Amino acid sequence: MDFSFDNSFQREMAGFYAPAEAASFPAPELLAFNHALAQRLGLDCGQADAEALARIFSGQQLAEGAAPLALAYAGHQFGHFSPQLGDGRALLLGEVVAPDGARFDIQLKGSGPTVFSRNGDGKAAIGPVLREYLVSEAMAALGVPTTRSLAAVATGARVLRERAHPGAVLTRVASSHIRVGTFQFFAAHFGAEHVVRLSEYSIRRHFPDLADAPNPHLALLDRVIDRQCDLVAHWLAVGFVHGVMNTDNVAISGEAIDYGPCAFIDRFAANSVFSSIDANGRYAYGRQPQIMHWNMARFAEALLPAIHAVAPEDVEAAKALVDAIPDRFAARWRDRMRAKLGLTQAEADDAALIDALFGAMEEHGVDFTLFFRALSALLRGERAPLESLLPRPDAMAGWLGDWQARLAREGDTPGVRAAMMDGVNPLYIPRNHRLEAALASAETGNLAPWLELLDVVRAPWAERAGWEEYARPAPPDFGPYMTFCGT
Ligand code: AMP
Ligand code: MG
């Protein structure tokens, strides 16, 4: 298999990583391989059979040109600074350049201990690996910027968590693995010169148009804030809860990364939390914009030495960028919500209409995903889908009247609007009860439900005959739903 690796981080960033090596595994077996993604990356897997892929994507056979590294990073975890994290159970195999010129990291996750493992075993269990694979692919299908999943390989070894599980390795593809925590690590331990180097590398790699800005580090802050506002607005718009928005889990590329205790909301509640370790709801659905703001303030702090080195007076400009995040986010959020509601023009009262909607959805406990599809059905003259979600048929009559009055002030026909809405409001998401059932089945050796769910979430928009069950909310006896970071 030919990756044609071109390892810029290894070449240009000596001192920012440590060499790493995969553990040896008794019986690697390919669980899934993402051929479409391999093609997008321009990987030539022509001759590679499942056995060869299993060896390569569990780190047992090193592809030509690979230079396995573990990256150093720090991070605020649940608000507390951990000065030393780093890739404790992952290694960067190398970088590939796709036919369109885009550069990607190929990373093995769960590949064994590294110098950053602290007390961890460096391994991953099959459940979290297949969860990350499926949810990241669902997010990609939804158009959310995200890391992707190229392969999942069972290792044949057991991994001990609260009990023993089959072990697995995930191959993750990211436009880079540089995190806010990467900046924090070098700011905390090394100071301005290293932060400048990391910032310059990040700009070359992700945002080359910023290289000529008067203060490129300030421009980087501005751009990363922009991407994070977009990302979190997109999460909220699809009902996604990341679950562990620590600064080490925030990629500066603006891709969603590190799918641990994540989940999609079913019955809407702004305080939804699915992570077993998030007892205080720090990373609840509705808190994600504030946490993103907080994380960007930490990013600004880490970048300050570099910003200051170019122009001391720009420190004030950095502060102003951070202070402006709530407004910037709110504008992105309103744009996304307008699209979900079939609105194309901005009006002054839109924020009030959106707030009222969320209040009503919460009051009536409606299914977040199905509600927006029910609105488009309503525009087509079908009331039944909406009524099936409400406790009584007229439960949201007030809000619906306001929305329809608002729609009437715009031009398109209801049919055109309904089609637009169905292009941004998914019908199929990784429903928690389906995902849990699929993972439980995979753990006992039957991958069929997981593979079928993967097919479904890769085609989230158009209704398909035979997939009716995948669009149904969880049965009433399911939940409260908890996911475990026990990755
Ligand atoms: P996460 O909660 O997955 O974002 O991981 C936080 C930190 O813990 C990172 O530095 C990981 O590399 C490290 N880590 C998580 N699980 C393990 C493990 N099983 N072995 C070693 N390090 C781990
Ligand atoms: Mg992480």
Image (spheres, rainbow, N blue to C red):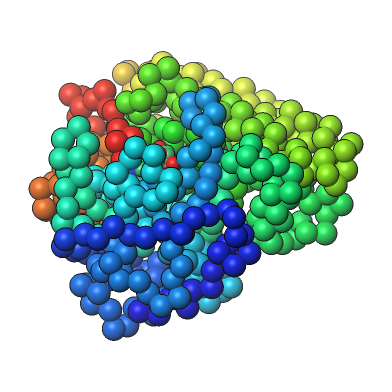
Residue 46 drawn at (x, y percent): 32, 83
Q: Is residue 267 among what the camera can see?
A: no
Residue at (65, 55) in percent of width and height: 202
In the rendered view, tell whether residue 174 sits above or below residue 302: below
Residue at (20, 27) in percent of width and height: 478
Residue at (69, 49) in percent of width and height: 194
Q: Nearer the viewer, residue 116 or 342?
A: 116
Please tell me in which quadrant of the rendered image residue 318 appears: top right
Residue 408 drawn at (x, y percent): 60, 35
Q: Is residue 44 among what the camera can see?
A: yes
Q: Is residue 485 left or right of residue 433?
A: right
Tell me the quarter of the image containing the N terminus: bottom left
Please tell me in which quadrant of the rendered image residue 276 appears: top left
Q: Nearer the viewer, residue 4 or 350?
A: 4
Residue 308 drawn at (x, y percent): 82, 40
Residue 344 drawn at (x, y percent): 63, 43
How many discs appear?
0
Q: Nearer the viewer, residue 265 or 72?
A: 72
Q: Is residue 176 left or right of residue 44?
A: right
Residue at (54, 73) in percent of width and height: 6
Tell me the quarter of the image containing the C terminus: top left
Query: Residue reaching furthest bottom?
Result: 47
Q: Is residue 93 left or right of residue 288?
A: left
